[in-house]
Image (spheres, rainbow, N blue to C red):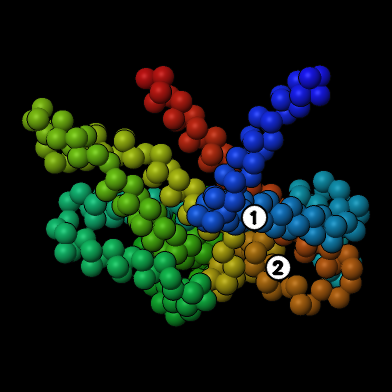
Amino acid sequence: MANAALSTPGVPMQSRGLEKKQTWLERLRKGDEVVHLITLAGAWSIIVITGLLVQHLWVYSAIARHTFGWRFLFTSTWDPVNGLFGAWPFVYGTIVTSILALVIAIPIGLGTAIFLAELAPRKVSDALTFLVELLAAVPSVIYGLVGIFLLIPILTTAMPYFQKVFGWLPIFSGTFYGVSYFSAAVILAIMVVPFIVSISREVLLAVPVSQREAMMALGATKWDVTWRAVVPYARQGIMGSIFLALARALGETMAVTMVIGNVAQVSTSLLAPGYTIAAVIANEFTEATGDLYLHALIELGLVLFAVTMIINALARLLMLTMKGHEVTG
């Protein structure tokens, strides 16, 4: 009797174990468990790849980090012969060209996206959207060639007239030789506009029709509906497209290398030649002869990775803040 009493409570537990096993096998046969494991492995691979990337950059920049410390970020001397390395000209050039590119690209990209999503006829919108997506697929070296043979001659011709109007500003002072921060920023703007247009257009098209109809019922014009109802509703997606474009601009290499001048200096004038982090790595990595030189270039890569991560984190925080304001409102 005692043995029977003790064995009786165990039966439900065994049956539950069998049911759980059968459920797992059933999910495995249906493919649910397989898909879950594959997608989980894919998600973990992102974390592993990012961790390995940071770890390698950190390890192989050790000599430069120990030699220069934080001075590496804030000094301007880049002298491989004497073993003196400072990253500030490259950090400065990367930030200046990327921000100026956004200043040029945001109005053009957002205006184009609004036209394609809200104002253009469907056939015209589809045709222009195809061209925009085609621009996004053009290799960056092609943009560099366009910058050298088309953009720089145009800017060289137009710059004297431009300086007559804006030459009193320090950022447009000095002699313009073609290759410059300004040329690099214009090429970057041309390269990132397709990203802003494509993503912003899709976000605008995803706005519910009820948003438009509600404002039209109040007697609003087409432009009022677009600017006061559609664009505010889609602003999170638009901000996401802008920060994605900024991330692309920060890491762009070949096109910028071909038009910025590649001079390790800091200048307040946008018409002066400069340098970026990605450009100096591309130009000098194969020529790095000593360990300190090589580790300094790899530390530049670590700095660029950190800047990109910070920008993406700020973008995520900004979008979360905007969402919180919407919920509160």
- Residue 144 horizontal side relative to residue 303, left or right: left
- Which amino acid, mark 2? Ile
User: Which residue corresponds to the image point at 31% horizontal and 69% vertical from the top-left?
Assistant: 131
| Label drawn at residue 322 | none
User: Which residue corresponds to the image point at 90% horizontal and 58% vertical from the top-left?
Assistant: 63
In which quadrant of the rendered view does residue 219 lie?
Answer: top left
Instruction: For marks 1 and 2, give the CA distance.
Output: 32 Å
Q: Is residue 103 above or below residue 220?
A: below
Q: Secondary structure at mark 2?
A: helix
Q: Position of residue 182 (x, y in %)?
A: 50, 61
- Residue 203 horizontal side relative to residue 167, left or right: left
User: Which residue corresponds to the image point at 69% horizontal and 31% vertical from the top-left?
Assistant: 11
Q: Position of residue 9 (x, y in %)?
A: 71, 24
Q: Is residue 213 above or below residue 311?
A: above
- Which amino acid, mark 1? Ala
Q: Position of residue 281 (x, y in %)?
A: 71, 68
Q: Which numbered disc, 1 or 2, marks the residue that appears first in the sequence?
A: 1
Q: To which residue does mark 1 refer?
A: 41
Check disc 1: other Cα within 10 Å, few if <14, some if 14-19, many if 20+: few
Q: To which residue does mark 2 refer?
A: 281
User: Which residue corresponds to the image point at 18% horizontal and 64% vertical from the top-left?
Assistant: 124
Q: Is residue 81 visible?
A: yes
Instruction: Report the number of numbered marks.
Output: 2
In which quadrant of the rendered view does residue 1 lie?
Answer: top right
Q: Position of residue 173 (x, y in %)?
A: 51, 56
- Residue 201 horizontal side relative to residue 226, left or right: right
**Depth order, front residue of 5/88:** 5
Check disc 2: other Cα within 10 Å, few if <14, some if 14-19, many if 20+: many
Which one is closest to the eye, mark 1 or mark 2?
1
